[in-house]
Image: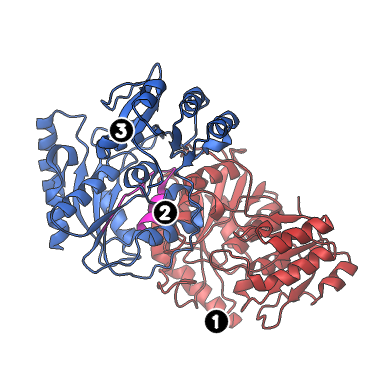
Chain colours: A red, B blue
């Protein structure tokens, strides 16, 4: 792991919890490595960690400030710069998963240099990839796919990996996005890979393995999203999944960041199976994962039951019910 | 146009004419700007241009050596390096559309510096793109799609643009690959764009225009190709085409560079329409373009007739029949 902990999570001026998805993911899956959060005025997100200033965090031993915001396009906002410089001046490293490189901000780069601190751009790997081959390889793979961005694909994958490990099944979470990489300590931010090499990068990320080993591959975007569908398709072809879990947020009115309506679960399953057969003819959908956090728990459980019946598949909310039924279906295949 | 002509086309050790696709495209669509070709021992490709050494080409006034080969992954082969250095030492610029940057080869970079010649990497634009929005924009667009890579998508698009212009219809060829850019003098090599920004780059490349203006967008890859389908999908979503022309090479046994079988024309049309409706619900397929160059002309014409009847669409070979029936269908829509 190249990123030193404990972390101070920077939530900036994130307008809501979705906009602080990176911070939330780290707080959930690596909470013991997090000292606190730092929020700017107007921030509408909250990880539940203690609010700390840069100085307080440094005094308690924080090693790295993590930029915990996401936005469409992955740009670093100029309004965050003062905080990043303060963190560097307090002796912390700064790590970011955004497209914009930290070192492209001259004042930030100078602050890192004068304090001998590191700027870590998780999204920009120096790894060179080949093009995908489409050749089958040993080992088993499950991929989380979705009706949209930000519908629980990473959470679901992490929960499946945790449940497989709990049952003694060899498994690895394979991170494909910035938050997943900050959680797992390795992975490839595939949306920053040159388009030609996306499938090849995923083939590299999930190499041949023992026949009964499971790679649990974090999905990205949606085959239906007008901004990111190409990323999702390259990931699907490269992962060659034996199994899909389809993720959905049932209260979402339109796709995140655009005016396009959400596709249905049925058509999402059908299109992913159609496209996935291209590199793995054995592909099957083993279940559905709903994010019901915007519903009352009883309404959420009702919806899980009805959705499962409608599609004839196990249907869970990882936070509400756990993912045991998905793992049962996975191992029964 | 940033690339000085006339050109010397470098075919290297291309094993066949497909491997010299870039050189062939330039020789066909910018022949007046080409002085000759340079082939290494074992080269199986031929553009029909005079064979010239670097020295002969320089004496006749060549300004730029164009790396006219393509390969999966777009790597510069070390065996070509001697020729590139000789060209620079003879005072020529060198232009390449491969992924590997010319300046990443130290000896080539030094040769360019000592001769004050330029290294032009067409594929690597300094242009920054946003993510795609999926918002509709004015003007009309036709996209060439395919059952595979290297099945005539660029040729068909260039022929359609030529025919539209001949009829007095305002039209622009929009290049999305290295050869297209070398021919048109502008464009975006979308396979080198970070995966997140492919749709956004294509939205930028084909901006809002007059209502009756046609952008003729060069397609890339195939929705069915396990290496490149994500690029094709991002391009389709970003182009928002009103019309598709589907391209196919009828003697191809399996998809180029992989062991995957070719999809049928019918399923290629169906999947492209299904995916394309996501950003343009009015999308329609206006015709089929076959590359029948590996058949006898009579067999080729027979196949065009039968294929057109089978799918109920105009079916042409741009080199054998021209593309007038496609343009008729385009303008009738």
Image coordinates for residue B298, horizontal then vertical, percent: 9, 31
As drawn, the label of residue B34 is 3
Whether labels 2 and 3 belong to a single chain: the reply is: no
Q: Which of these two is toward me, B53 or B275?
A: B53
Residue at the extreme top of the image, as rendered: B41
Residue B222 against residue A88 in the figure, above or below:
above
Whether labels 1 and 2 belong to a single chain: the reply is: yes
Q: Nearer the viewer, mark 3 or mark 1?
A: 3
As drawn, the label of residue A116 is none
Query: Can you tell which quarter of the image residue B216 is in?
Result: bottom left
Can residue A274 be seen here? The reply is: no
Relative to residue A119, is residue B125 drawn left or right? left
Real-space CA distance between mark 3 and mark 1, rounded to the nearest whole angstrom: 70 Å
Image coordinates for residue A276, horizontal then vertical, percent: 43, 50
Q: Is residue B71 magenta?
A: no
Query: Can you tell which quarter of the image residue A3 is in?
Result: bottom right
Residue linked to disc 2: A273
Chain ID of residue with mark 2: A
* Magenta range: B215-236
């Amino acid at each position: 792991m190249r990123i030193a902990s404990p972390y101070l999570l920077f939530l900036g001026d994130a307008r809501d919890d979705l906009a602080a998805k990176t911070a939330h993911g780290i707080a959930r899956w690596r909470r013991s490595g997090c000292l606190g959060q730092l929020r700017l005025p107007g921030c509408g997100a909250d990880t539940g960690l203690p609010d700390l200033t840069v100085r307080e965090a440094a005094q308690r031993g924080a090693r790295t400030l993590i930029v915990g915001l996401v936005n469409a396009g992955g740009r670093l906002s100029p309004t965050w710069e003062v905080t990043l410089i303060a963190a560097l001046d307090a002796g912390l490293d700064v790590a970011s998963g955004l497209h914009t490189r930290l070192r492209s901000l001259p004042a930030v780069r100078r602050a890192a240099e004068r304090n001998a601190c590191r700027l870590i751009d998780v999204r920009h790997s120096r790894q060179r990839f080949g093009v995908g081959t489409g050749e089958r390889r040993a080992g088993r793979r499950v991929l989380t796919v979705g009706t949209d961005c930000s519908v629980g694909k990473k959470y679901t994958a992490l929960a499946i990996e945790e449940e497989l490990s709990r049952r003694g099944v060899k498994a690895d979470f394979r991170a494909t996005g910035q938050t997943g990489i900050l959680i797992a300590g390795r992975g490839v931010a595939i949306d920053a890979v040159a388009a030609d090499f996306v499938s090849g990068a995923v083939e590299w990320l999930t190499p041949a393995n023992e026949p009964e080993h499971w790679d649990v591959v974090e999905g990205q975007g949606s085959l239906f999203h007008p901004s990111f569908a190409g990323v999702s398709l390259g990931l699907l072809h490269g992962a060659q999944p034996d199994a899909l879990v389809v993720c959905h947020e049932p209260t979402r009115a339109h796709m995140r960041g655009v005016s396009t309506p959400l596709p249905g679960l049925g058509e999402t399953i059908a299109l992913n199976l159609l496209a996935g057969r291209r590199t793995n003819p054995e592909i099957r959908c083993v279940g559905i994962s709903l994010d019901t956090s915007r519903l009352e728990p009883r309404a959420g459980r009702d919806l899980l039951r009805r959705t499962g019946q409608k599609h004839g598949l196990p249907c869970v909310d990882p936070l509400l019910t756990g993912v045991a039924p998905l793992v049962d279906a996975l191992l029964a295949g």
